[in-house]
Amino acid sequence: MEMNPIITKALEEGRYKLLEHESFELLRQYNIPVPDFALVQNVDEALKVVKDIGYPVVLKVVSPDIIHKSDVGGVILNINNDDELKNACERIRNNIKEKSPYARISGFLLQRMVPEGLETIVGATKDPIFGHVIAFGLGGVMVEVLQDVSFRIVPITEDDARSMIREIKGYRLFNGYRNMLARDEEAIVYIITKFSELLSDNLNIVEADLNPVIVLERGKGAYAADARFIIGST
């Protein structure tokens, strides 16, 4: 099987981590829902593109040298108008100059804000014996604090994915809890199975995280709001 052009390009450039817009493009190839997004180089491009994406948006720095964007002030959320977008571009540039002055900036990711929902994580590692193993759990800090995660070996069927979701202790949140409405379980089933397909087709992926995957109310879907892929030469 031919290597995916996105992965080929990264390896040819000596990179072992996909840039965020590349990660979203890879997800989009497999019809995994992501917020509308675009890579822009400056304020003028951002102001043009946002007309199609629509407010509110998120702005993120794109750099091969920055691992944790939020640690260097490289992410600004809830941008609601042109003035806020202009200020966000300037603030991120200034933050990077101050906190990571030697980082190369490839541009900015302009991304539509996803409505609030239940944060989950869909991740994967490549085991030398079993191949890709997918993990599912509650997202954000909850996955680290509670260690409430289920695992399956790729390939994963819809029934496998449904079992993964229902195994975690936090599954009760999917059916609604107190003032929280029920979540769209089938949307996560779809994402897990498509993610399994993506991994099966791309053996060069050695580690991946979709975190958070925001799960909306039942019937309204789910979106991968952030994505990270580590790749290897084999």
Image (cartoon, grey):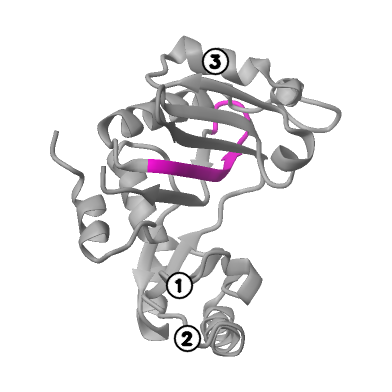
Report helix, strand or loop for mark 3.
helix
Local crowd size for mark 1, using a 10 Å CA cut-off: few (<14), some (14–19), many (≥20): some
At label 2, counting other C-alpha atoms closer than 10 Å, the crowd grade (few under 14, some 14-19, many 20 or more) is few
Mark 1: which amino acid? Asp
Q: Give how far apart the Cα atoms at labels 2 and 3 are.
A: 45 Å
- Magenta-tinted stretch: 206-220
The three-letter amino acid code for the residue at tag 2 is: Tyr
Q: Residue at x 33, y 27 (%)?
A: 197
Which residue in the rendered view is the most extreme toward the left?
A: 2
Badge 2 vs badge 1, beta-carbon distance below 8 Å: yes
- Disc 2 from disc 1: Cα separation: 8 Å
Residue at 39% across, 83% down: 42
**Label for residue 65?**
1
Mark 3: few/some/many CA within 10 Å (<14, 14-19, 20+): some
Estimate the x, y position of residue 157 in percent, counting from the top left: 41, 14
Q: Which residue is mark 3?
A: 162
- Numbered disc in front, either 3 or 1: 1
Name the residue beneath numbered marker 2: 102
> Counting residues from the N terminus, which is met first, the one under dot 2 or under dot 1?
1
Q: Nearer the viewer, residue 170 or 185?
A: 170
Query: Is 114 on the left-hand or right-hand side of 41?
Result: right
How far is mark 3 from mark 1, CA to CA?
Answer: 37 Å
Residue 144 place in picture, x, y as percent:
72, 41
